[in-house]
Amino acid sequence: MESRDQIIERYLNSIKDKNKDDDRQNLLDNQIKNKPSEEIATYLTSIPAEENGGLTAISGFYYQFLVTIEYILEMLEGKWDYVVMEHHDDVVVGKENHIRFIQVKTSEKIKIDVTASPASGIYSRGSKTIGKDTFRKNDSWVDKLISNAEIAPKSSGFKTEFQLYSSYHFIKTREYNLDIYTDNKGYDKVIPLDDNLFKKISEPVRDKEGVPYIYEDICGEKVPQLLSRFYIRTGLSLSEMETFKNHLCMKLNKWLFKDIGSGITMQIEDLHMLIGHLCTKCTYKNDPEVLMITKESVEQILGEIRIKSIAAASLATNKHDSVQITNRVIDDLLKQLEESDHIGLIQDKLYMYKEYLMEWISEGGNIRQLLERYIDGTTRTSIYSKLGDTDREVRLQELFHIILILIIGRESFLRFTTNRGLLSKQCETKNQMFSFFSMEKKKNIKTVLQKLESIVKSYDLDEHLFLIDKDLYIVVQNYNDRKFISSMKWRFSDGSDLDIQEFDNDLKLNKVPLEANIIPGEMLIADFLDSIEEKTNIQESLKEIWGNYQGGEI
């Protein structure tokens, strides 16, 4: 018995080029060929369903790709070995010697009489004149389907099936009753000799060259045998396209994330990405090996969708978690300060800052990275995982406490900077930068400064230059040095090499230092808590406190 690969190769070698509708080929050549998948998908989805070109309506083309994906899903589940698009028929699927040919037909209507257009295409044949001889061609939908038995004959060991996949229902008439075919899911019905479709297809017919086309001679089987494997399948209507897409996404989700569960889902735009990929293949109409899709060949694009979906889910989770923890921490902070006579001002400033944080989170910021930079001065750290939920919220509370003091005392707003080192905020009204740092474990000030030195040493040149002309204040938390009760000036020993080409070598500016005021955050918070117990103007009190720690008003 032939192997799967041998059967596939023989099938491909037997392929004959069949004429495609001019409108569809023009669409492939002019709008799709050599275009990236994303652009193709955008083009397909941008055209209204009612905009069409006969049998090649763009909505029909789009619908056909959804049907193709439906069969790709069956292939992923092991039912088929391959899926071929846009060659013998709209879709061809196969497993070993079993081959199914599928035509996809669409209309804006939901139901159509068999005798009405376009449904009459199921049996109606066109005519052609060669010289003085006029004859009927074997070009009805059924002719085109069952004549595929010629390239995969039963005598060669092939088991063929023929499916008409329609977006609308065929309404039977007095002349045509297709119930036997719409009920032929097993592809095994016995066709009675009085069946009108059988009678029609049995009438004399010729091919496009005018040569008589006799099914028994060319395909090796009589018409009733071929029709016994013909099934009319009614799918969702064009008006139900969204339902169709959602259904496919749901099934793809089960396959893509079977090892993860239901927490991650692909989106409709991911389905469009897959359609764009399939559409690109259809431009290679003379290369059947490109048109063939196997499980292995489709897994790459699905792998990209999986990675994208997991990343999107992670981003959504981080965003949700960031919002939740921010709300909790600010609410807890307000509860701690609610007995103060200044709670109105405190509440106003904290809610204003909360709005800013929510906007920051919506634009891609997240609490995980905030805490990582607050404690380790970099996002390349595992510190977030080491901290428990309670410790994370304690650290955020101490951070928001300091920021609240700054906002009230300075009467100006602070925004996160884009630098990648220490967690920093820039003052809107002055050329001042406030950085915040909390030790992972309580240490003395000497160890704190060593840690800060290592963070600054990791700065790249751009970040160093960004800070060099700023008044830099670093508020430190989580230390255990009782002597650290006032701010200190500190010059970092490591700077950045500035190589200015116009200077001689011995005139280069080398190791330009950074200077900062190191502020004891725990003392600052203690003084703040004392001040809010008093009846005095809280803003004036905080200005005075800042002056004490800065050696003058900042």
Image (spheres, rainbow, N blue to C red):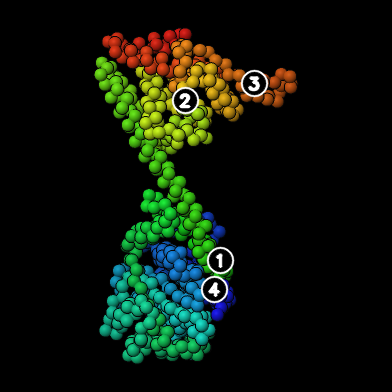
Looking at the image, residue 38 lies above or below residue 214: above
Q: Quadrant of residue 253?
A: bottom left
Residue 505 is situated, as x and y percent measured from the top left of the image, at 74, 22
* Tag 2–tag 4 contact (CB < 8 Å): no
Residue 518 is at least partly visible in this image: yes
Circle 1: residue type: Val
Q: Looking at this view, is 520 or 245 the one in front?
A: 520
Of badges 2 and 1, the one in the foreground is 2
Q: Which residue is mark 2?
A: 441
Say which element carries label 3: strand
* Label 4 sits on residue: 4
Q: Is residue 371 left or right of residue 458?
A: left
Q: Which mark is residue 511?
A: 3
Residue positioned 74% across, 19% down in the render? 506
Between 204 and 277, the one nearer to me in the picture: 277
- Is 511 situated above or below 318? above
Badge 2: few (under 14), some or many (20 or more) residues near its Cα, within 10 Å? few
Residue 235 picture quarter: bottom left
Mark 1 nearby-residue class (10 Å; few <14, some 14–19, many ≥20): some
Residue at x 42% of width, y 12% of height: 546
Q: Are marks 2 and 1 in contact (CB under 8 Å)?
A: no
In three-dimensional space, the C-alpha distance between marks 1 and 3, rounded to whole angstroms, equals 59 Å
Label 2, label 1: how far apart the Cα atoms are: 60 Å
**Residue kind at label 3, given as amino acid type:** Lys
Q: Which residue is mark 1?
A: 290
Q: For the point 59% across and 25% down, which residue is it?
A: 457
- Please, what secondary structure does the residue beneath circle 2 have? loop
* Label 1: element kind: helix
Q: Amino acid at mark 2?
A: Lys
